[in-house]
């Protein structure tokens, strides 16, 4: 693949999918409802650190649930993959990302770090003397994945914290089930902050490319996560990265992915590259409609799907 092949593939995907009108902005977080729905950015970052971008790729948006992946990375570093597996789990819930029923069906255990319950559980297992340190460590790991200093948006954070009753209820259920490993309200507050940081589409592709490169950020050259932990993260992204659409995504695209209700979506082709997309309108499961379509097209053109049999198409 030459530079111009990557650029042409990105431009083609942007052109074919930008006219899609399906989906709508998340509206249960007031700030997200106010973002321009026509925004659309795409980026590819390779494991060599080459960056390709198209459209509104420098527009900053809320990271939201994609943050769950980076908190998982830190949790794996802190407590090890075996303990993490036991405390948080690794199975898909088959239910929406904020489902209370999923907890009720499983003794208030979260099953996976990539739904709200498991994400708060992951936040709670981090080594930290207080919630300031917990938050500082999360912001630091997000920054190391992105290769630049990531910051909190007070506007997004205030909007989320003031409409966060449902997540607080989940935090207490986790506590009652024994899967909340620090003060539930402090953890919920930090979890909500970790969702309220701003990234652009290129940042998101760099974050994904860090996983594609086995845990080394290809732009800074610095190791962010132990190589042996990366497959556990990618497996979770396959199982639960797009919530109740994770199966459809695996079937159609065949790459680990993670979405956020801010409109971001990142897909990882291990050993090769990451593709990121951002556009606010979401499908019913909470995944960006345009980003899914564009990334699917790019993955298909570049033959990136993990389940393809090499040499046989
Ligand atoms: N902050 C959001 C929430 O907790 C994140 C959800 C998401 O992106 N799926 O509801």
Image (cartoon, rainbow, N blue to C red):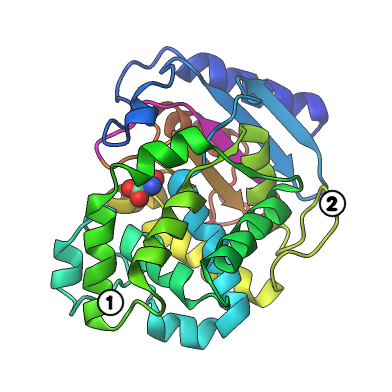
Tell me: residue 122, above or below residue 176: above
Q: Is 300 colored magenta in this rendering?
A: no
Circle 2: is it few (<14), some (14-19), or many (20+) Cα within 10 Å? some
Quadrant assignment, res 198: top right
- Horizontal and vertical percent for residue 69? 52, 59
Residue with the mark numbered 1: 175
Q: Which mark is residue 149?
A: none
- Horizontal and vertical percent for residue 156? 45, 36
Residue contact at pointers 1 and 2, CB within 8 angstroms? no
Q: Is 282 colored magenta in this rendering?
A: yes
Residue 5 or residue 7, whichever sits in front? 7
Residue stretch in magenta:
273-284
Check disc 1 and report its element: helix, strand or loop: helix
Estimate the spatial distance between the alpha carbons at disc 1 and disc 2, rounded to whole Å: 39 Å
Residue drawn at the location 85% of the way across and 56% of the way down = 221
State left or right for residue 306 relative to residue 280: right
State left or right for residue 69 relative to residue 88: right
Residue drawn at the location 69% of the way across and 68% of the way down = 225
Tell me: residue 226, above or below residue 241: below
Residue with the mark numbered 2: 220
Tell me: residue 232, above or below residue 45: below
Question: Is the residue marked 2 within 8 Å of ligand 1, measured from its CB?
Answer: no
Q: Earlier in the sequence, mark 1 or mark 2?
A: 1
State left or right for residue 22 relative to residue 4: left
Q: Nearer the viewer, mark 1 or mark 2?
A: 1
- Horizontal and vertical percent for residue 111? 31, 72
């Amino acid at each position: 693949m030459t530079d111009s092949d990557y650029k042409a593939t990105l431009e083609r995907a942007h052109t074919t999918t930008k006219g899609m009108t399906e989906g709508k902005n998340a509206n249960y977080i007031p700030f997200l409802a106010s973002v321009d729905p026509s925004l659309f950015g795409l980026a590819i970052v390779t494991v060599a650190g080459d960056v390709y971008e198209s459209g509104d790729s420098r527009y900053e948006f809320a990271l939201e649930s994609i943050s769950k992946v980076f908190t998982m990375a830190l949790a794996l570093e802190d407590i090890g993959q075996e303990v993490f597996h036991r405390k948080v789990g690794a199975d898909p819930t088959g239910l929406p990302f904020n489902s209370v029923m999923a907890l009720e069906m499983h003794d208030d255990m979260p099953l996976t770090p990539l739904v709200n319950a498991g994400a708060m559980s992951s936040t709670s297992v981090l080594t930290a003397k207080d919630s300031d340190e917990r938050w500082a460590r999360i912001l630091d790991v997000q920054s190391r994945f992105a290769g630049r200093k990531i910051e909190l948006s007070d506007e997004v954070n205030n909007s989320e914290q003031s409409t966060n009753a449902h997540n607080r209820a989940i935090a207490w259920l986790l506590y009652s089930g024994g899967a909340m490993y620090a003060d539930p309200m402090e953890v919920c507050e930090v979890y909500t902050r970790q969702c309220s940081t701003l990234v652009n589409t290129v940042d998101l592709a760099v974050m994904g490319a860090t996983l594609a490169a086995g845990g080394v950020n290809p732009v800074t050259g610095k190791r962010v996560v132990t190589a042996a932990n990366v497959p556990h993260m990618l497996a979770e992204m396959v199982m639960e990265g797009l919530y109740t659409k994770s199966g459809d995504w695996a079937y159609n695209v065949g790459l680990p992915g993670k979405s956020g209700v801010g409109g971001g979506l990142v897909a990882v082709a291990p050993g090769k590259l990451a593709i990121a997309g951002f556009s606010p309108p979401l499908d019913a499961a909470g995944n960006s409609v345009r980003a899914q379509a564009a990334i699917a097209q790019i993955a298909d053109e570049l033959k990136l799907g993990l389940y393809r049999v090499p040499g046989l198409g």
